[in-house]
Each structure stands twice: as structure tokens, then as C-alpha cells.
Amino acid sequence: MDRFSFLNAAHTAFFADLYDQYLQNPDSVEPSWRSFFQGFDFANEFGNSPVEQLSSMANGDSGSTVVSDKLQKEFNVLKLIDGYRTRGHLFTETNPVRDRRNYYPTLDIENFGLSNADLRTVFDAAKVLGHKPSTLQEILDHLKNVYCQHIGIEYMYMRNPEVIQWVQDRLNINDNLPNFDNQQKKIILEKLNEAVSFENFLHTKYVGQKRFSLEGGESIIPAIDALIEAAADKGVEQFVMGMAHRGRLNVLANIFRKSTQDIFSEFDGKDYDQEYFDGDVKYHLGLTSDRKTRSGKHINLNLAPNPSHLETVGAVIEGITRAKQDKYFPDDFSKVLPIAVHGDAAIAGQGILYEIIQMAQLDGYKTGGTIHIVINNQVGFTTNYLDARSSTYCTDIAKVTLSPVLHVNADDAEAVVHAMLFALDFRMQFGRDVFIDLLGYRKYGHNEGDEPRFTQPLLYKIIAKHKNPRDIYAEKLITQNVIDGNFVNDLEKAYKQDLDDNLEASRKKSLTIITPFMQNEWTGFAQVSDDVMLQKVDTKFDKKELDAILETISTLPSDKKFINKISKIVTDRKTMYNNNAIDWGTAEALAYGSLLTQGYDVRISGQDVERGTFSHRHAVVKVEDSEEEVVLLNNIKGKKGKFNVFNSHLSEYGVLGFDYGYALANPNALTIWEAQFGDFSNGAQIMIDQYISCGEDKWNNQNGIVLLLPHGYEGQGAEHSSGRMERYLQLCARHNMVVADCTTPANFFHLLRRQMVTKYRKPLVVFTPKSLLRDPRCVSTQDEIANGQFQETIDDVLVPKADVKTLVFCTGKFYYDITAERENLKRNDVAVVRIEQLFPLPVEQLKEIIAKYPNANDYVWAQEEPKNMGAYSFMLMNFDLVKWRLASLKAYAAPAAGSYTRAKRRHADAIRMVFDKNLFQ
């Protein structure tokens, strides 16, 4: 490899400037440079390949000027500068309790062809640093200050020269050293005191209780405080923050200003003031608060609630942020700032981080840059950092999006604040992610009842003797004559007195009050129980407006050329509508259009959702010659809502978390996540189990997220048949969500409309069809669309009720399979009832239907899923008015057989069981 291949754009710019200076006044440059430039058409060569030409000349190749020793060393100094920029972070003083690992080669000047004899030599290469020609010693001092003190920065892998130059210009200011005035220093100390004193108070008053102490990382409190203040001055109006349990209570108390009375009530284990929800542990709760900054700005702060499942909340806060940006600041995303706080083991080990990071620049998911902060304890529960990752740093995932990383010593509060302000400026300048790796320690074990010396005895001997960041900083300020010896004692006394007063007041209260997160976004919405969820809702829509929407979604622009299949699919919508045979895709588009005209936003997200996995939606159509995108729903005249549909990257976990957050922040947006196949949702199981199914019960938060899960047995094997209905039904309880399996386009139309026109929000899980999308039996009329309503159950109207001996109940596509066989067998003694909504189960409707069949004595639950899957066990548990006879596949480990022949045979066997009670599994 050429020994000058390190030359980059900054270096060539340096040479260009130096050459320009030479042209204006040859005597103004150092003699070795004059010799270098004489007789060389530098401008012309620069137009070709300056780096190669310079390398060739520097090596003394044929036709080039022989380089002097001085000039050779200029190049060596450039290599030294480049070495510090690329590898200086490996040699910093950023670890407060451990020696750094050794990395080779070092940055010793001998490794760059320099020696101590060169320390007093003046080098023009200093101009690359924005300095005048300087001695090697001065250059070294600058490089060590910038790159090897309490802040180490990684950025040279970024590919945009403008961004690299911006970073370097910032680093060169005051040698990248903090420069705060005395008042700012006192504010930093005050926030440090709050952080330290809060933890000490809890440790004394609630001995042994879990609180996941911040001790060892307290400097994050003044850093976040400074971030909020500075960001507000730069125009940020809302903050959305996500973090795990470590330090959460401290952040709630000292940043979000949550009442410590409420925190103490939670420590005392008091019951809640409502029976409606069951709550969560204190270090999982979220909060929304409004704050006035020291400069008089008003800002909205949001800390999202989260479960123990680490890093999940990162996806949620990105969705919340994007919803707020779309709603309030669509033209300036910088006004809503997401802040994600990580643990070192979690950011390195949890795969969802990669899914979230990959969203950062995607049109449907970007949020204008997130500030990532790692509270780096250098241990994960009991696991040493060397066992927690293969990468050098826990933050190496930042390189995926070429984001800069600042590694900071958590004992140096000023350095931490300085790094945070740098990160803010970077985000505001470029709208990109930035990472801060806050190297500290964890004073106790994973929780306060854990013994860390079992697994890290040496480390915890050091930690036991280590001073906290407040005392370290106070000593520094006393030395600088910024404060006197009583300043900290007075701060601590006043703060702890306030805590004592609030503790006494809290113990006079008998109940704990939990304020729902982001309640300001939910004005006009009420929390309801299942009795209200089962009430009928008016979802009719004006026929003339429906006609107008249909005309729009069935008309392609006449001045653009589309492939023939697209033209037919789109124009067929009108044909089907006029023939009163509206298919699923058309009914779905009409539902979106109707909501848009009423002022609701619609957002659809997931893998391949623009077209639809089964090519039924075509919400986005492409012009044949240019691939220009046409969204017909956006052409609806007078629409008041916004329609967005985004193909996601190949992620379920992260994207569903994002969309859950989006729905949480905007209840007036129909927010849909569609799985490519229904069972692919198991890749997002944590979001379903920990957020969607129980978020309202734990955190008192409503959410209207819609999951569309393609489901149906059509011989496509184990992975493309079942949406795992049984798993969702097992999660259903009280009033937590709605589970539906519609059999008609009209019912799906009204289900989507009901989701928005009510004044409450519940997660909606819909098992959607595949083959039925084009089945001529699965169609609806104009009247059913315009004047109907959602039907939780659909009774059989095709057979005389008095003739019925066998009453069959089923869901979804199996209805069409059973009725086709009934017609083939000419069995009028069998009626088939469709349960379109499984939860909340419409028990009273089912009782009314059963009462209409006076001669029925055989009650069948029929399903195409195996016995141990589907809705069978749910129905056994929730509807015991009749004794069920089961018609289904046998119990199997996999949802379906891989062999088409075997799957077809089993399916036929299940159907035969419906009509022959003598057949058993």
C-alpha cells in the first residue's frame, strides 16, 4: 500500500492553499515547499488526481522532484495528525475506575517517522488543524487535548467531507476543552448534588429496596439538564425520551420534576387510586411534564414508560417523535428531539438496536436525528464487558449510520456536559444520530439487594473507595475559587430538607396516583370497559361521498403510462363497485378514503404494504417509464386527513414498536402495521406481550394500533398459514384489545371505521384473508358498505332455522369452505354462524342466535387450525352455554403440514367432521 494513501480531502485542501500562497509570494513559504512546487503545474495536476501526484512526487518517482527531509517530515506530521484523528479515542483518559486496555500501534511519534529532535521544529502541517505553522510539540499538545483527554471521539469513518470538517472545526475550538463560566459551573454542581443526594436519601429511607441507582453515572443529570436548556434555545419545543430502569427515578425527579411525594408513595407500595388498571413497578413508569427553561422558553418533556425488556422503548420513542413531527412540525423535524438512553450491555447485545438504527434515514421512520446516551457501567448484571461484546466499544453499532461517537469520563461533569452540547449541535446541524458513551460505574449490584463482589471483587474494591462525581467536582471548584467549602453542604441540606418534607406529606396519603403518559394528546378520549366496547357504533358513510371516493381510487392519471395489469386492477374497482360486488381491496381503500374526508390521518406501515403481500392493495402505483409514485388516495377532493403508506425495512420487532409509539402519540391517526404473513408477527412478540396487550393495564395509556395479520390455510406450509390466533386470544382479558377475523369486505370496512369514530382507543388485531382477496364469494354491496355497521356475529340466512339440527360456529375463511361442502352435500340441517369478533366475545349475541334454532342439538366449533391452536381453547374457556363438538385438525406441533397433499387431506377431514358427528379426532 502506498505510504501516502492516508491523504484525504482536508490534506489536499491544505496543499492547494499552500500552493496558492506560493504563487502569490514564493518567498512566503518555507524553502522545502518552494523546492517542491517549482516547475510544477499544480493546478492542472490537481484537476486530475492530486493525491496520486503528490504521493508520486513525495516518493521521488520518475519525473518528480526529490523530496527533502523536511518535506518528508511534513508528510509524517500529517500522518501523525491523521493518526490522532482516527485512533486517538483508543488512548484517552475516559475510564474512571479501570485502566484502559493497550492498543497497538501506539501514537508515539516514532511510529510516524518523527523523533524528539523534531519537537521544536515548526511545521506547516499545523494549518490542517486551523493553526498557524507550529512546532511539533505545540501540535502534539493540541492533539492530546482534543483527542486523548476525558473525551474521545470517533468520526473519521464518516464519508461526507463537509461533516468531517464541521467536527474538526468544533474540536479545534479551545482544544475541545470545556469552557464554562462560574454561573454555569454552579448549575452543573447543583444538578450533580440533586442526583447524588436523591440516591443517598432513598438508600437511607428505603434500605434494600430496588431502585436501580444512578450512582456512578450521576453526571448524566446535569448533562440532560444542559441539553434541554440549550435545545430549547435552538428552537426545540418537545423532547421524547426513552430509558431503562437504571437511574430512571433520578431522571424523573430531577429532570422531569415528578413529585417526590408520588415516588415515595410508590416506594411504600400503596394501592392505586383507580381499579381500572393494575400499574407497574415505579422504575418503569413514564411521565409528561411542561417546563420553563432558565431563559424563559416553554418546553414539553416526555419520558415513555417501558417494560424490563431492554431497548424496546427505543423503537417506541422514535414512533412517538415521528407522530409529533408529522402532526405539529411537518416542515421542521428538528423541533422534536428524541433522546435514547441505553445500558452498555443492552446496546451491544439487543438486536432491536440494529433494527432501530436502520430506520434513521428511511422516509417513513426518520426523526431528524436521535441523541443516544449510554450509561456505561462496564458490566451487565454480572457479565464483564469483555464477555458482553466482540466489538471494541459497546457503541460500535453507531458506525452503521456513520454517526459520531463521543466517549466521556463520567467523573468529569464538565466534559460530560460539553460532549452533550456538542452532540446537540451536531444533531441540529445535520439531522443525524449521535452517540455519547458515558463511562462510569455501578456503585452497587444490578439492584441494591445484589452482591457484585461475587463476580467483580477487584472492581468493587476500587469502586468502594471512589469518590462520587459531585465531590470530585466540588473539590475542583473550590480549588478554582468558584465556591467555598460550605456551598455543597448548604445545597445538600436544602435539597434533603425538601425530600424530608415530601416524604412526610406522602405518608399522609393512602393511595398512589398515576398520571397517564402524554395525556395532553388524548383530550376528549375516555377509557372504557368491555361493555362499552360491545356497544354498536354508527359507521355509516354518505353514499354520494363514497361514490366520489370510488371514482378517485379507480381513475389513473391519463397523462401517465402504467403497466396493463395495474390499469386493469385499478379500473376494475369501478366495475366491481357498479356491479355490487366490491372486493376486499376496494372496500379497504374506501374505508381509508372515508376516514380521510372526516379529518383522520391514515398511516400504513410494514413489509411490502404499498402493494400488499398478495397484490391486493396497490395504495402506491408506479408509472411504467419513470417509476414515479402515484397515490390515488391523496387525490381525494376535500380530504382533511393525511394518508401515508410506507414499505418498511425487513423488520417486525422494531417497526411494530415504532408504529405502537406513533399510535400512542396521535389517537386521531389510524395507525396500521401489517405483517407480511400473520405468523411473522412472532418476530415482534415482545412488543405484543409487553406493550400492545397490557400497556393500558400497566401504564394507564390507551393505544389504537391496528395489526393486520394474513391468516388462512391454503397449503402454503407451516410458516405461511397461521397468524397464531391462539396467542392473541390468550392475551385477551377485561378490556385490553379487540381481536377480529372478518369474512366480508363490508365488515372489514366498518371495523376500520369503528376503530376511529369511537371516543376510545384499543389495540385492534385483525386476521386478514389471502385467497379470499380474489374469491368471488367474498364480496359486498354498495348498501352494505354505505349503510351497514360492524357485525360482531353473522347469523346464517341460507337455511330454515327450524330445520337445523347442527349449529356450527367458526371464524374466517373456514366459513366459505364449510358452506361450499354443505351446498355440495345439500345439507339444510346444518347452519353456520360466523364469529367476526372474538374479543370482546359477543356472548349476548351468541345466546340470541342459539335461541333462534329450537331444534338444534349438536353444537360444533369448527376451525382449520390444529386442535391445540386457533380459537378452540378460548371458546371453551369463555362460552360454556353449549357443549362443543370440535371439528378441526388433530393437535400438531407445527401449524400446518409442508406437503400440499397432506395439508389438503387434513383440511378435508376437518370439514367432514362438521357434517358427521361420528367422526372423531
Image: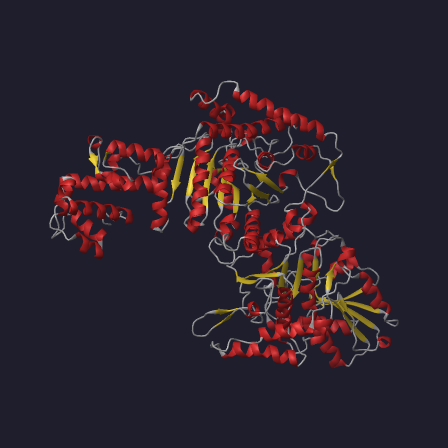
Relative placement, left or right, of 483 versus 696 is left
Between residues 233 and 26, which one lies in front from this camera angle? 233
**Residue that lies at the very extreme toward the front in this rendered image:** 296
Instruction: Please give the name of the residue rendered at 46% of the width and 38% of the height, measured from the top-left corner.
Output: 420
**Res 674 visible:** no
**Horizontal placement of 50 versus 356: left or right?**
left
Instruction: Quadrant for residue 143, please give it.
Output: top left
**Residue 646, image x, y percentages:** 53, 62
Q: Is 56 drawn above or below residue 505 in the view shown?
A: below
Give me the residue at 46% from left, 55% from top.
361
Q: 216 or 727, which lies in front?
A: 216
Using the image as rendered, state which of residue 542 and residue 408 is in the foreground: 542
Q: Is residue 382 visible?
A: yes
Q: How far across and how far down the image is residue 721, in percent?
A: 62, 66
Q: Specify how the rendered protein is coloured.
A: secondary structure
**Residue 780 screen position, x and y as percent:** 69, 75
Q: Quadrant of the C terminus?
A: bottom right
Q: Nearer the viewer, residue 98 or 247?
A: 247
In the image, taking residue 92 as reference, residue 484 lies left or right, namely: right
Q: Quadrant of residue 499?
A: top right
